[in-house]
Amino acid sequence: MRTYLDCVPCFVQQAIDSARRVTDSPMMHEQLVRETLAAAAEMPFDQPPPVMGQLIHRRIRELTGIRDPYHAAKQQANAFALRLYPDLKRRIERAEDSFALAVTLAMAGNIIDLGVKSHLAEEEVHSAIVEALEATLDRSAIDDLRQAIASAHTILYLADNAGEIVFDRLLIEQMTLNKVTVAVKGSPIINDATREDAEAVGLTKLVNVIDNGADIPGTVLEACSDSFQRLFEAADLIIAKGQGNYETLNECGRRNLFFLLKVKCPVIARDISTNGDAAIDQKGVCRLGQMVIRRGAR
């Protein structure tokens, strides 16, 4: 997905929020915002928005010397989600359609996105879960994903954020585990999950976990390691979580790819409404807050 003019104010706000998270220095806040504006002026708009996110957060790390500015926030998100896990696991086990509920909860967990909202209250995650349990999802899309998982010999699951990966675990546990490889980011970027987070929530004990070799809040294939690119190309099925993966992979041309996300951005809602079908409502509109299952290469 290309970058739109509406993305630019979000870049600036993200730079301000991130700078304030790691330093109290007004001079550093101002410097980062000025550099973000300069970078936005030079950025090719045919690139997806996460490419700009990479530039912003690399510069934050350079200016502050802090390798992972979101480390504490990620630990808190993992711990919070793990407290929810036993109850959510029981709900899935008791559900009439355990797979459908696991898919729903995995998408609800996508609310844990500090790139979109710099501070997220626990009550907002609880609200997202309640809304998910009451939502009516596209049954045909769920069944399409169910069948794709059943028929695949190798599944590559592209994780998104820390905390959210606990919700992903609920879905992964519905699969044949020896088929699944989970990919996390190669190094810290916003609150995206790294191997440390996968270990913290027990994913490394369940399935093979790799990193993609990159620090972009999405999956830009040419920026990823050769080993990840080979695995991506060879996988029978790819499940991509979150907005960043949608922004960077929605035009990659892969039919064996499913996007699972909660729409938190009007630009993405508009893009899905324009280019989607099963993801939209009866009026042909994708709404903010909507949970989306969308197959690639439509």
Image (cartoon, helix red, strand yellow):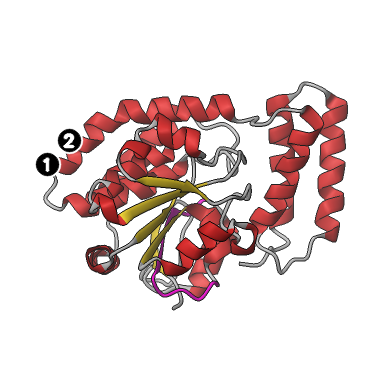
Please give the name of the residue rendered at 73% of the width and 61% of the height, measured from the top-left corner.
5
Quarter of the rendering containing residue 79: top left
Return the x and y of residue 27 as percentages of the image width and height.
88, 28
Does 254 appear in magenta?
A: yes
| Type of the residue with mark 2 | Arg
Tell me where the magenta segment starts and ends, as one range. Answer: 252-264
| Type of the residue with mark 1 | Arg
Label 2: few (<14), some (14–19) or many (≥20) C-alpha neighbours in 10 Å = few
Rendered view: 164 above or below 239: above
Q: Which residue is mark 1?
A: 94
Separation (CA) of disc 2 from disc 1: 6 Å
Q: Which residue is mark 2?
A: 90
Label 1: few (<14), some (14–19) or many (≥20) C-alpha neighbours in 10 Å = few
Return the x and y of residue 140 as percentages of the image width and height.
25, 69
| Secondary structure beneath label 2 | helix
**Whether residue 246 can be seen here:** no
Q: Please give the label number shown on residue 252.
A: none
Residue 18 left/right relative to 139: right
Residue at the extreme top of the image, as rendered: 24
Please give the name of the residue rendered at 46% of the width and 50% of the height, measured from the top-left corner.
183
Return the x and y of residue 259 as percentages of the image width and height.
43, 61
**Whether residue 168 can be seen here:** yes
Given residues 271 and 244, the one toward you in this image is 244
Return the x and y of residue 100 as percentages of the image width and height.
23, 54
Residue at the extreme bottom of the image, as rendered: 298
Given residues 178 and 149, the one toward you in this image is 178
Rendered view: 195 above or below 181: above
| Secondary structure beneath label 1 | helix
